[in-house]
Image: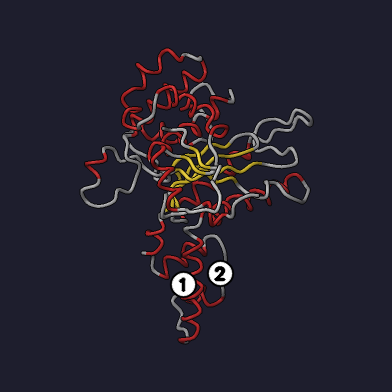
Amino acid sequence: MPRARSQQVSLSDTPYYHCISRCVRRAFLCGEDVVTGKSFEHRRGWIEVRILFLAKIFSIDVCAYAVMSNHLHLVLHVDDKQAKNWSTHEVLRRWHSLHKGTLFTQQFARGDAMPEYAVELVERSAAIYRERLSDISWFMRELNEPIARQANLEDECTGRFWEGRFKSQALLDEASVLACMAYVDLNPIRANIAATPETSEFTSIKKRAEAANNGTQPKTLYPFIGNEQANTKTGKPNGILFKLADYLQLVDLTGRIVRHDKRGAIDLSLSPILQRLGIDSENWLVIATQFEQNTHGIVGQEQSVQRYKNAQPRSRPNKRCCSLLS
């Protein structure tokens, strides 16, 4: 039986999650349907635009994404503290970009004079919206539902477009986050629909590579902030604690290995960053090519998984935990 979403997402253990949504009824997001000959490539653009739009609205950062033919991958970072610091006006501004809200929230947002009881109702509504804007389930709902409606309209049909539940994996440490991001960014390479990471359309790695050419990072993606020691002096860092150049090189070299099966070069090519991640080079190749097959609900190094298990007592062992990165 699937675990309740509230049990899968525990921000006290980790703010990072790998989410996957798949289509039903032989539906396509992109590519060409071999039965009808109809192309659905344009739908990849729909979903990429929606992902990057929601990243500006929610207090949830997008670390990586890949839009494939009939499914999509996301690596998300939940910043619930950011949402708690928003003013009521800021919460309403963000929520109203997604939904109309109520008559009272619209009046409050405009600055209209309101009776005290109405202001209290607005504050209650804002508290609900604030919680939703830092909730992964709401992020995925706001991503998937508009795409489903648009696809159904185009297909002139009704019914489900996505599977009922999106899959969620908790990423317990930096090693699992980087491994999952690389797996997501290399999906088009593995599927043989792109020759290189920087030419793989509708992926985060393409966005990062394009921005890196100009010496910047995409504003809509969670940034790489470099050395851990340099960024923890002023408090908890707001970004991924590795250099962007290291990550781009790691993905590129891993992609070459995936495509050409050159296992012999992995130690020489990838040793420095893998040592910092604490991942054996042979393990890295398994992770980067078979993340979904070899991981389940919880992913992390052995000590991270054990800490999670100790903090989440259960009546029976949790077989969905995975310490592949040990």
Q: In this figure, which colouring scheme has been used for the structure?
A: secondary structure
Tag 1 secondary structure: helix
Task: Tell me the residue at 29%/51% (across/down).
Answer: 236
The picture places residue 146, in percent across and down from the top left corner, at: 63, 52
**Residue projecting furthest to the front:** 315
> Are dots 2 and 1 in contact, CB under 8 Å?
yes
Residue matched to label 1: 109
**Which amino acid lies under the numbered mark 1 shown in the image of this protein?**
Ala
Q: Is residue 49 visible?
A: no
Residue 200 relative to residue 241: left or right:
right
Pick the front one: 72 or 43: 72
The answer to which of 287 and 159 lies nearer the viewer is: 287
Query: Residue sitting at 78 percent across and 47 percent down?
Result: 156
Query: Could you say which disc has been placed on residue 101 in the image?
Result: 2
- Find residue 290 and report its horizontal and vertical position in percent: 54, 29
Q: Quadrant of the C terminus?
A: top left
**Around disc 1, counting alpha carbons within 10 Å, would you say few (fewer than 14), some (14 to 19), or many (20 or more)?**
some
**Residue density around tag 2, few if under 14, some if 14–19, many if 20 or more, within 10 Å:** some
Type of amino acid under label 2: Gly
Residue 275 in view = yes
When asked about the image quadrant of residue 251, the answer is: top left
Residue 59 higher or lower than 295, as above or below: below
